[in-house]
Amino acid sequence: MRKYCGTPRETIPFKIMDFFVDIYANLFYKKRKLAPINHAAPRILVASLGHLGDALTVTYMFPLIKKTYPNATIDLLTAQWCEPINLCNPHINQTIYINHFQTNRRKISRWAKIKEFYHTFRQALPILRQTNYDYYVDIRYTDAVAHFVLPFINVKKAYGFSRRALGGLLDKEFDVPAREFHHFEMYFMLLREIGVKGTFADIEPYFPISNKVSLEQTQEKIGLKNESFFMILPEAGGERRMLPVEFWANLIERVLEQKTLNVLICGQTDVPSKILDKVADKYKANVIDTSTKISIHEIAILAKNALFACTLDSFPEHLCCVFCKTITVYKGAGLPFFPLANLPVYLIHSHKPSVGLPFERDNVEVVYQENVETDAVKTLILNKISIFLNE
């Protein structure tokens, strides 16, 4: 029996919908005539209709796929807001966009999101129909699975999760473990079905920066001189996961009391400007608000040259730890989102179920704090900053 994800108000419609989907799938869809899998050069459709963090970490699958199938063709089905992540990726044959209403964070009505979803779906279908895919792999196990495309396109084998309905359209549907797990464990579960094996030690995080972006141009754009700097990225996917602006302002002041540095505050909202407003006047000359001024690729090139970055559980954390040492605070989130890093990460979290659980990346130091908005947490961060500055 399927285990659905969500409240009864959500799951009851899933059960009703799946009753009819299963009838259709068993009578018609799963009896489709299929050619043999092309193991020499498989065509693979990877679906990820989530947010920027998912968009970045799912690309870590692609080198693993290419290692097993050097001649594989990888098409990516994703959302338009993830375009900057995939723009320069050498492993992607083509990117096809559907803006799922469940993961659309634009400040528009739900009806407008549904209309956008339908419009992008109609645009994507002719592109998807041009290819006979050997495999479909959807990494989403929460909102916005893409299984609804399967009856309209040619796929020989489809793998994904059934927790948000439409699992009857899959050739093999998976559930998630009844324990805390890292999201990449679920990716490995799917990859094994297409013959790709790997462990956490095999993951090599990367983000190809556009050759149109340079450090010099980015520095000039934001008014940053050739001086040492660190970055603060204080935004997350929801306000409940964010820290007060006073927390960040006080942290900046305490760092600058010890050492003269430039501080870049990056974001896409007014949070960085609110933090800057709270910083004491004597330190403001060293603080640069870059919010809405720079692109993801410019953030990446700055991270590549930063002393370190301070972030929350969010896409900026996953991006920064590809390029620089990172200190991150998780307010409520835990093991599923722990970072896959190239450089050392110091992670403070308040997620009790994740305490003591193993994480197979040896460059991530994990510390539990019941409350992450305290002076004690600031002291932990300052101590780690001192270590980073003296290394």
Image: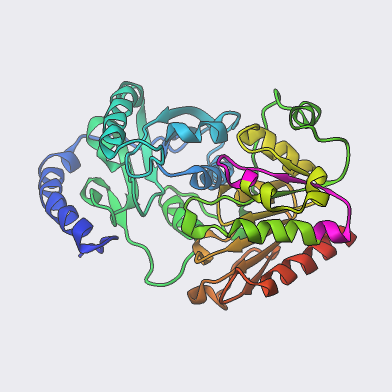
Relative to 46, is 313 above or below? below
Residue 309 vs residue 126: left or right? right
x, y percent for residue 68: 54, 44
x, y percent for residue 122: 28, 24
What sort of colour scheme is used for the picture? rainbow
Residue, x 45% and y 34% (percent of image)? 76
Residue 22 vs residue 262: left or right? left
Closer to the camera, 106 or 149? Answer: 106
Furthest residue to the front? 281
Quick check: is 266 in the magenta stretch? Answer: yes
Residue, x 52% and y 66% (percent of image)? 334
Residue range (magenta) = 255-273
Residue 358 quadrant: bottom right
Closer to the camera, 173 or 368? Answer: 368
Q: Is residue 341 visible?
A: no
x, y percent for residue 251: 73, 60
Quick check: is 5 in the magenta stretch? Answer: no
Residue, x 56% and y 32% (percent of image)? 84
Residue, x 63% and y 68% (percent of image)? 348
Q: Is residue 148 visible?
A: yes
Q: How many marks?
A: 0
Q: Quadrant of the C terminus?
A: bottom right
